[in-house]
Amino acid sequence: MSRLYFRTLSKAVNHYADQGYTFPFDFSDGSLDPAKWIIVETHRFEGFSDPSDNAVLYVLEHQNGLDQGIIIDVYGANRDERISRFIQRIPRLFV
């Protein structure tokens, strides 16, 4: 996958949804295994005036070759620790 640039988070989300990255990640029960996913792209978005607008979009693919999806993680006080822990445990294809 080539490195893409998006001006807005919504454009990135729409692009990846159009490409089939639609897996419905559910962190409520802790059943997702991060070892079975690979992060293939990341995109960082920073708000112009409000630090609470900062987010990272992760593009993920499952080792089964079928499932693919995106996760949005925000910086700061609104961060969901379940998502952050999951992301930290996923292998990455790039440095």
Image: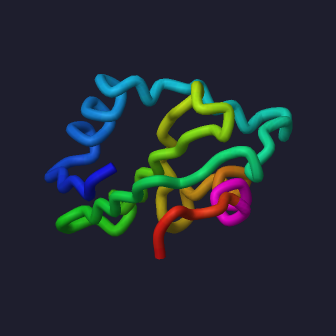
Name the one closer to the observer, 6 or 37: 37
Position above or below: 12 against 65: below
Image spot of residue 35 (x, y percent): 76, 52
Position above or below: 4 against 93: above
Examine the residues drawn in magenta and state their main secondary structure: helix
Q: Residue 19, located in which quarter of the rendered image?
A: top left
* Label tally: 0
Position above or below: 10 against 45: above
Name the one closer to the observer, 61 or 80: 61
Position above or below: 67 against 38: above
Q: Is residue 54 magenta?
A: no
Name the one closer to the observer, 80 or 20: 20
Image spot of residue 5 (x, y percent): 18, 55
The span shown in magenta is 84-89
Farthest bottom residue in view? 95
Q: Residue at x 26, y 58 (%)?
A: 3
Give the color scheme: rainbow, by chain, secondary structure or one colour: rainbow
Q: Residue at x 33, y 49 (%)?
A: 1
Farthest left residue in view? 7
Image spot of residue 94 (x, y percent): 47, 69
Image spot of residue 30 (x, y percent): 84, 40
Apparent side of residue 64 relative to residue 17 in the rendered image (left or right): right
Apparent side of residue 23 relative to residue 57 in the rendered image (left or right): right
Q: Residue at x 26, y 38 (%)?
A: 10
Q: Residue at x 18, y 51 (%)?
A: 6
Apparent side of residue 69 relative to residue 31 in the rendered image (left or right): left
